[in-house]
Amino acid sequence: MNTAAPSAHAGLFNPSDPAFIANPYPIYQLLRDNAPVFRTPVGFWFLTRHEDVNALVKDRRLGKGFAERMTRQYGADHLQEPAIRSLGLTMLVQDPPVHSRLRGLVTKAFTTKAIESLRQRIEALANDLIDAVIDAGEMDIIRDFAHKLPVHVICDMLGIPEDHRGRFMQSSQVAGRLIDPAPLTPQELVIANERTQLSETYFNSLFEHRRTDPGDDLTSHLVQAEEAGDNLSDEELTANILLLFSAGHETTANLIGNGLLALHRHPDQLALMKSGQLNWGDAIEELLRFDSSVQLTSRTSFEPIEFSGVTIAAGEQIVGSLGAANRDPAVYADPHRLDLTRSGIRALSFGGGIHICLGARLARLEGEIAFKTLMKRLPGLQLTDIDQVQWRQTFTLRGLTELHATW
Ligand code: HEM
């Protein structure tokens, strides 16, 4: 096996190719078998083995190196673009000690107890969404259910009033692209900047509202933390609320969409889920392993570091393919088979190390309730065309633009 083979496989790797986006797993497999530590033609390294990706997210000799990465991708004069500046202030791309300070301010809202207390509300929301479409006999699962459910849940958590939520119900095609290893086009950057500024304006007015009329929600708690001292700047407050908002819904919407598609492509597993005779925790973990809504995570090496016998110099961008690691046969028997009874999954769908997904418990609960509700309320649900689905043109976040169903 050739672990380095940087250029031999260069022609294979085109993350913007629609065929790759539709099904990246054969390319992941080729790379994992032939060049698991692969230098892509656009200059970042790409890791596909479970062992390497797991080490990448946990090793403290690596960090986010966000400013360096953005400078490389866009040039230093673009660091103050609203979308880049806002993302740069979030815990997602910060290294300690700033990362620990920002994450520490919100972890309490995501403990097992706090999340479990949301169960009844999430069940009620899921049922309301089905009530709204059941008589029509059809829906776009993404627009009418998968997107709306987590948006309502994160809006509840952030204290966004019900009558303000309409603006958040449209799925954005550009949001999320900024975290791709390939840069946005100038037009996409303009749209991302506009969206960021619009959201900032909205959240600033929400903060004013919550300052005078605090509630038991995350925004009120963060506004109080900001007022209590120098723990959180105004800009950090806005940026991290925006992060929670977008991380809190796009990913979960895709768990529901990708999961439902996978189930319909594996009718025996769909029947098993409908029977209810399964461990729901394992089943959700398996759906995430099989086709995760977050396909990769990126780090920068602070010093030379070795993966599978290849030494990578300091200052390089290294991308770990969570999607490839989740299908590594060294860890999972028959990895391309969806098996809801698989147990002990060591999936990297939620990342690992200090940036491990803050919302993993919430996502698992939302996923469980979404699938249980769909199976119970719409047992005759059929997807209209499971071979012609449209994927969103992103590399990091994996999800469908729409998914039509009838019953
Ligand atoms: C199926 C759903 C989800 C998936 C697959 C997912 C996946 C991930 C992954 C892989 C990371 C790590 C990124 C990295 O290493 O750079 C992450 C981080 C994060 N996620 Fe999620 N996520 C999901 C849902 C959620 C939800 C519902 C929320 C919150 C409401 C959330 C909030 C966050 C935040 C705040 C971070 C940054 C944590 C940090 O940097 O310390 N996620 N997520």
Image (spheres, grey):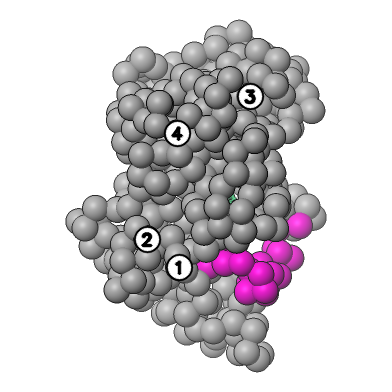
Residue 6's disc number = 4
Q: Which is in the foreground here, disc 4 or disc 3?
A: 4
Mark 4 vs ligand 1: CB below 8 Å: no
Of badges 4 and 2, the one in the foreground is 4
Residue 374, image x, y percentages: 55, 28
At horizontal 73% and vertical 20% (from top left) the residue drawn is 342
Q: Is residue 326 left or right of residue 133?
A: right
Amino acid type at image mark 2: Arg
In the picture of the structure, the residue carrying the numbered disc 2 is: 72
* Cα–Cα span, label 4 and label 3: 20 Å
The 10 Å Cα crowd at callout 3, few under 14, some 14 to 19, many 20 or more, is many
Mark nearer the viewer, 1 or 2: 2
Judging from the image, what secondary structure is the residue with disc 4 in?
Answer: loop
Q: Position of residue 353 (x, y in %)?
A: 70, 52
Residue annotated with mark 1: 67
Q: Secondary structure at mark 1?
A: helix
**Around disc 2, counting alpha carbons within 10 Å, would you say few (fewer than 14), some (14 to 19), or many (20 or more)?**
few
Residue type at numbered disc 4: Pro
